[in-house]
Image: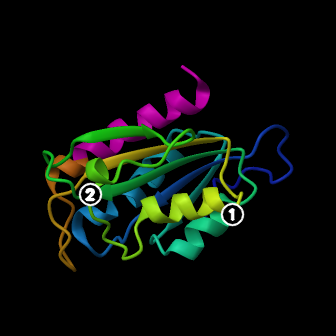
Amino acid sequence: MSTGADSAREGPRIIVLCIGNPQRGDDAAGRAVAHALRALRVDVDIIEEEGEATRVLARLEGADAAYIVDACVSGATPGEIRRFDVGTGPLPRAAFGASTHGFGLAEALELARALGAFPSRCIVYAIEGETFDIGASMSPAVAAAVDTVALRLRADILGK
């Protein structure tokens, strides 16, 4: 899903890839950030995915800059936000922890890098999750982090 912006927009192609499963508690964080970012009317392609590796790879193709938002499980405090610039090196697996999507985001990004499909700028925002049960609601700590990440993304994209 995009913002509906004109596909003939001039300039670099910037995407925000928001990953998550809206039916699995805090795993919905990335998708919730997509909704919050759309409300801020940032003129970029905002894409929602469940995190399947081949879909992530396909979305990165042709992007000049990619901002990726996903929930993570690393043992940090629920709702903690971390920002990783992975344009120059891999996503730190120890900091990012396990993926809720099987083949993890770190592996998908490194595969994109190896295939030459990696954007020149790639930033990952990770929101520490607490509950990932099917049918669960997003925890209050993660829900509070959603708007903060959307505002940080907006500033990052606009260079402010």
Secondary structure beneath dot 1 equals loop
Asked which quadrant contains residue 157, the reply is top right
Three-letter code, disc 1: Leu
Relative height, residue 159 to residue 61 (above, below)? above
CA distance separating discs 2 and 1 = 24 Å
Residue at 82% x, 44% y is: 9
Residue at 85% x, 40% y is: 10
Q: Is residue 69 left or right of residue 111?
A: left
Magenta-span inclusion, residue 148: yes
| Residue 47 pos. (x, y %) | 57, 60
Relative height, residue 71 to residue 58 (above, below)? above
Relative height, residue 94 to residue 123 (above, below)? below
Quadrant into which the C terminus falls: top right
Circle 2 residue: 97
Q: Is residue 84 left or right of residue 148?
A: right
- List the single residue furthest toward the top: 160
Circle 1 residue: 115
Magenta-span inclusion, residue 149: yes
Q: Is residue 101 left or right of residue 109?
A: left
Quadrant into which the N terminus falls: bottom right
Three-letter code, disc 2: Gly
Q: How many numbered discs sit on the rendered protein?
A: 2
Relative height, residue 118 to residue 41 (above, below)? below
| Residue 140 pos. (x, y %) | 15, 51
Secondary structure beneath dot 2 equals loop
- List the single residue furthest toward the bottom: 134
- Residue range corresponding to the magenta coloring: 144-160
Circles 2 and 1 in contact, beta carbons < 8 Å: no
